[in-house]
Amino acid sequence: MNASGPLVLHGVNRSGTESACIQGWAIFQGPVDLASVLAIKNWKSNAVRLPLNEDCWLAINGTDPSYSGASYQQAIKDYVNLLNENGLYAILDLQWSAPGTTQATHQQPMADLDHAPTFWSQVADSFKGNNAVIFELYSEPWPDSQADTVAAWTCWRDGGTCPGVPFQAAGMQTLVNSVRATGATNVIALGGVSYSNALSQWLAYKPSDPQNNLVAAWHVYNFNVCSTVACYDATAGIVAAQVPILATEIGVDNCDATFLNAFMSWLDAKQLSYLAWTWNAWGTACSTFSLINDYAGTPTSYGELYRSHLSLAP
C-alpha cells in the first residue's frame, strides 16, 4: 500500500498487546495461531491493527522480561508475519506510553519525547521493507484538553511544551523523522487531535515527509464530537479529497445499527478504509465493544452488525 494507492482496508483491532505486557501476565490476549487469524479473515477482513506499548517494546520502567524487550518484539514480529502470510495487512500503533520513569499503563494526551522517537526508530527498523505494515504513530492525541484548537494542532505537529500535556511531547514531525531516518518507506498514518476524531486542521498542519506517504487516521464512535454526516463532509471529506483516510477505530457502545451502517456507507462511497474496535471476547454487552463471543469468530450483537456490513461491502 502507498498513500496514493486505491487499496481499501476492512478489518479489526486486536487489543491486548498494549496492556497485558505492562500488567505482567502475557503479551497477547487470546490466541495468535493460524486458526484465529483465519477467523478474522473469514469476516472479509484484510487488515488487523495491533496497539503497542512503548515500555514493553523498549524493556524499560520495570517491565517483566518475559513479556518485554526481545520477547515482546519477537512476538509482535511473528504475529505480523502470520497476518501477512495470510493476506492481511498489519497496522502498528503506539497506544500506551509515558514519560521518564512513569510506567505506560494507559493513554497519554501526546507521545512523550523521552521514549517515543526511540520506540518508532526501532519499530520502523524492524519492519522497513515490508509495505504490508502501516505505522500509526500515536493512537489518540488529545492535547489542550481534547480541544480542536490552534494550540492543540501546533502541539500535535511540533510537540514540546503544550497545554494539557504535563511533559515534553513528541510532535508528529519528530516521529515521522524518526521513522524515515531508518530508511523505512512504509505508509504512516496520523490521527488528528481530540482522540483522533478531529481532522479539521489535518491538512494545514500535515508534517513534511520525504516519501510523501502520509495518510490520515480517524477514530469515530457514536459518542464522539464528530459523529454526523454533516461533520464528516465538512472535515474528513475535505481531507479525503487530498489524502487517503484510514478509520483505524470505529464502533458503537449501544449497538446502534443505523449510526454504524450510515457511517460505514459514507466511508464505502468514498472508498475509504475502516477497522472496528475490537476483536476481543470481553462480553456480550454492546458497551464492551466486543465484536466476538469467542476467537473462532462467533459474533456478538454488535459484531454481527459489522460482519453483516462487511459481507456486503464493495
Image (tube, rainbow, N blue to C red):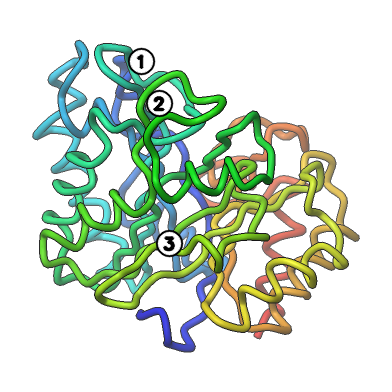
Report helix, strand or loop for mark 2: loop
The residue to which callout 2 is attached is 19
Q: CA distance from mark 1 to mark 2?
A: 6 Å
Observer-nearest residue: 112 or 126?
112
Left or right relative to 52: residue 273: right
What is the quadrant of the N terminus in the image?
Answer: bottom left
In the image, what residue type sits under mark 1? Gln
Say which amino acid is labelled 3: Ala
Circles 1 and 2, Cβ within 8 Å, touching? The answer is yes
Whether residue 134 is situated above or below residue 123 in the rendered picture: below
Which residue does the image show at 62% across and 83% down from the upper left?
A: 241
Mark 3 vs 2, N-terminal side: 2
Spatial CA distance of label 3 from label 2 is 22 Å
How far from the left and from the top, in percent, is residue 257?
A: 86, 57
Q: Residues at badges 1 and 3 in contact (C-beta under 8 Å)?
A: no
Indicate the position of residue 234 as horizontal and vertical percent values: 79, 69
Distance, label 1 to label 3, CA atoms, is 27 Å
Location of the C terminus by quadrant is bottom right
Q: Nearer the viewer, mark 3 or mark 2?
A: 3
Mark 1 residue element: helix
Q: What x and y, as percent, mark residue 182?
A: 11, 59
Give the residue number, with chain letter if any, for mark 1. 23
The residue carrying pointer 2 sits among few (fewer than 14), some (14 to 19) or many (20 or more) residues within 10 Å by Cα, namely many
Disc 2 residue type (three-letter): Ser
Check disc 1: other Cα within 10 Å, few if <14, some if 14-19, many if 20+: some
Residue 83 falls in image quadrant: bottom left
Upstream in sequence: badge 1 or badge 3: 1
Q: Is disc 3 surrounded by few (<14), some (14 to 19) or many (20+) residues within 10 Å?
A: many
Circle 3 sits on which residue?
Answer: 189
Query: Count of labels shown?
Result: 3
Q: Position of 76 compared to 159: left or right?
A: left
